[in-house]
Image (cartoon, rainbow, N blue to C red):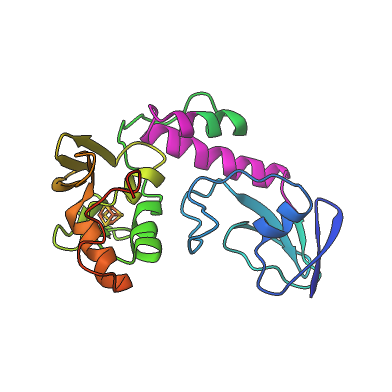
Amino acid sequence: MVELTIDNQRVKVKEGTTILEAADKLNISIPTLCHHENLTPLGSCRLCTVEVIVDGTSKLTTACTFPVEQGIKVRTTSRKALEARRLAAELLLAKCPTSVKVRNLAKEIGVDKPRIKVREEDCILCDLCVRTCREIVGRQAIKFINRGLNQSVEPHVDLSPDMCIGCGSCAYVCPTGAIKMEDKGDTRVIHGPKWEIEFKLKKCKVCGNYWAPEEQLEYITKSLDLPPGFFDVCPNCR
Ligand code: SF4
């Protein structure tokens, strides 16, 4: 076990626990946007920035990625931590001022309006879609292009059409609506920031409703070694 102090409260947690998880144990709330408990933490939004004092030296870090260490002191509401969070919120708000989720989080952090130029893009590069597709769906259909590199092309999310099964999980986790899913009749469309892809939906043999992309059902059938025709009937009619 590792013992640390968060906002002057002592807590003992297992080795490998992140500051975010340790704070949660003390009911200390730290804002997050790119974090999801079932995905590898990334710390890209930086809204969970906290101040950590290790061996008398203070530094800023993201609470979702920092594994606790014996004897460290964490300050979740110090001036330095709150300033860093406000800056992160301003950057996100300037990038995506129309997202309700971003606006609400920014407000919670004390930012109503960014001081920097508004760019009005949908994608905030939080990586939730990329990690969800890879770690939960088991595909690697989405990836970042030029992320973190100082190149002439802006970083953006790109899609490999032959890897995508149209499950819509990326749209479900997207906090800004940069990825959307639309079912119309026998077709599903996944709209991304710079792409869109269509899937034919399977028709239920009993009720006649179109209910899931054929590619997705084929993928699940193969992955779980299900008998052919297992998905001829939708879950409601099974
Ligand atoms: S719809 Fe495609 S890109 Fe999105 S999570 Fe599913 S497989 Fe990945």
Residue at the outermost top position: 112
**Image quadrant assignment for residue 68:** bottom right
Residue 106 x %, y %: 54, 32
Closest to the observer, 36 or 211 = 211
The answer to whether one can see residue 34 in this image is: yes
Q: Is residue 204 magenta?
A: no
Q: Main secondary structure of the magenta part?
A: helix
Judge left or right: residue 230 versus residue 89: left
- The residue lying at 62 percent from left, 40 percent from top is 83
The image quadrant where one finds the N terminus is bottom right
**Image quadrant assignment for residue 18:** bottom right
The answer to whether one can see residue 145 in this image is: no
**What is the magenta range?**
75-103
Which quadrant does ligand 1 occupy?
bottom left
- The residue lying at 37 percent from left, 33 percent from top is 96
Residue 152 x %, y %: 19, 53
